[in-house]
Amino acid sequence: MSSLEKNKETVRRFNKEVIEQCNFDSFRQLMDDDFINRTAPPDSNDGNGMWNTFFNILKPAFPDLTVEIYDQIAEEDKVTTRKSIIGTHTGVLMGIEPTGKQVKIDVIDIVRLKNGKYVEHWGINTLPTILSELRKTE
């Protein structure tokens, strides 16, 4: 398997084991100690901030959360993934009471990997739009 394919597989594993299953052991295995999330606020742009997003924000709000990967492009040490995070809003999400609605957060992210671990992340997603729509139903 080429290094590009290995990097894509690492990203797929992260999405399955960390985002979907909230597996902390996998998270630790896949995160470099010097990881930085370039699109997160400065006070939460490290691995702990990323784990908090999955474990304390998304998973409680969407216990049935799944990740559907549509495209992956790998070049040098980066993998770009177009995906959706899909789940039923049955828990509180950033102060919004459960609506029971099916939610689909579209995401495009870029991950830089080193030695099979996440070192840097950049991403855009539709969560702000989803939050606005959920607030309208409160």
Image: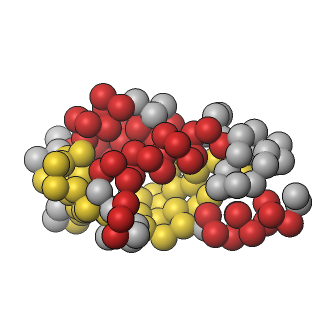
**Left or right: where 99 falls relative to 124:** right
| Residue 39, image x, y percentages | 39, 71
Quarter of the figure that contains the N terminus: top left
Q: Residue lying farthest right?
A: 137
| Residue 50, image x, y percentages | 39, 52
Identify which residue is drawn at 56% across, 47% down. Answer: 57
User: Can residue 66 be seen in this snapshot?
Assistant: no
Quarter holding residue 120: bottom left
- Label count reads 0
User: Can residue 30 be seen in this snapshot?
Assistant: yes
Q: Residue lying farthest left?
A: 115
| Residue 113, image x, y percentages | 20, 55
Identify which residue is drawn at 48% across, 31% down. Answer: 21
| Color style of the picture | secondary structure
**Left or right: where 101 falls relative to 23:** right
Q: Answer above or below: position of 79 versus 28.
A: below
**Left or right: where 78 falls relative to 66:** left
| Residue 19, image x, y percentages | 46, 42
Foreground of the two, 46 or 111: 46
Foreground of the two, 109 or 38: 38
**Left or right: where 115 falls relative to 118:** left
Foreground of the two, 24 or 14: 24
Q: Answer above or below: position of 43 versus 99.
A: below
Identify which residue is drawn at 45% across, 34% down. Answer: 22
Identify which residue is drawn at 24% across, 45% down. Answer: 31
Foreground of the two, 137 or 101: 137
Quarter of the figure that contains the C terminus: bottom right
Q: Answer above or below: position of 24 versus 4.
A: above
